[in-house]
Amino acid sequence: MDPVIASTGAPIRNRIRGGQSCLERLDQLRSLGRIPHALCIAGSDMNESKLVALAFAQDLLCEKINQEAVSACGHCGPCLRIHNVQSESVLLVAPEKDQLKISDTRAIMDYLSRASDAKAQVVIIENAQLLNKSAANAFLKTLEEPSKHVIFVLLVFDHNSLLPTIRSRVQVITQQAGTWMAIQELRAQKFLSSDALAKSGMTEDGALDYFKDFWLDEHFLDRSDWKEVFKDRTKSSELLKSWILIGLDHTAGRKIVSDLASIESKRFRSLLNELIQIESGPKTNEDSILNLESIWIRHVSNSLQSMENGAPHV
């Protein structure tokens, strides 16, 4: 059994964490009857994206959906076969030696040429950005002439890594890694090291000062110093990571930023969820600056107004 989905239970959607936002979007498309013939799931965790794609396949093929449940039951024949990687209605394509070749595209075409009475046929392509030129050109023809009930799900780290001709023919859904559970796991994974921060030209004290200023300086949005940092992708990434870990310490009760001790953990958790989405998402530096400005308006401006009025930071 595929180690990514191996477990003692089903449905697969029950084990999805960071990819919940993707699954919710797919649920919405299903409920509206607007499932495109080609999707692209973009995110920093390929295994999580694969779980989302397989859970989606279960939802499409489950025998009980729309009768006894709105999502896959996990226990009917089609659900169990997908879980056990034995479904004839789901094709998993993965690169060998960091490349998807024309032989992989031909295997897809051969699979789709076989007769099938299934409600859907789902083709999941891992690391689709690794399609070489000949494979991409052959695959493009398949995308341009979609067969009924066939759905392609391309998995990539960044949708911009796809060839423009392919990217324009798929609907992109971005995996947001910002669930609280995912953030908690960053600590165990040694998400940030002092060496990495130093190599980016930042110091821990400097990162902490920026974090305090973010919360306490009412003129933060007018300042240019932090925007200069965010123009450098490496510096902005390490700065955001350090902020996330500072916030984790704060919400764990260590309150290492005494000036922020009165701000409750719930507010920090909400902020951290959004910060990690900026850090891990396939966005440009300009987008990161705009997003951080938006976050400041939502999370900080109200807090500063409360301080001026003598109210607690809630």
Image (spheres, rainbow, N blue to C red):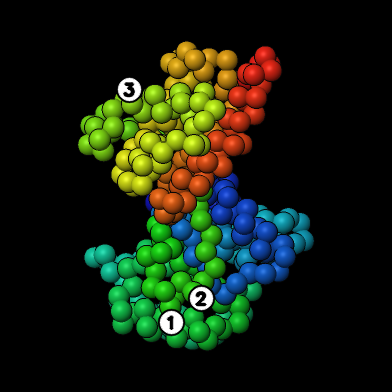
User: Label 1 to label 2, Cα distance in Å?
Assistant: 9 Å
Please say if the residues under marks 1 and 2 sit with CB atoms less than 8 Å apart: yes
Q: Amino acid at mark 2?
A: Arg
The relative height of residue 203 versus residue 62 in the rendered view (above or below) is above
Q: Can you identify the residue that label 1 sits on?
A: 140
Check the image and name the residue furthest to the right: 67
Please say if the residues under marks 1 and 3 sit with CB atoms less than 8 Å apart: no
Where is residue 293? Give x, y as percent: 52, 41
Q: Secondary structure at mark 1?
A: helix
Of the residues under marks 3 and 2, which one precedes in the sequence?
2
Q: Which mark is residue 202?
A: none
Q: Can you identify the residue that label 2 sits on?
A: 169
Q: Amino acid at mark 3?
A: Asp
Q: Residues within 10 Å of mark 1 (few under 14, many from 20)?
A: some
- Front of the two marks 1 and 2: 2
Q: Quadrant of residue 66?
A: bottom right
Q: Secondary structure at mark 2?
A: loop
Q: Nearer the viewer, residue 96 or 285?
A: 285
Of the residues under marks 1 and 3, which one precedes in the sequence?
1
Q: Can you identify the residue that label 3 sits on?
A: 205
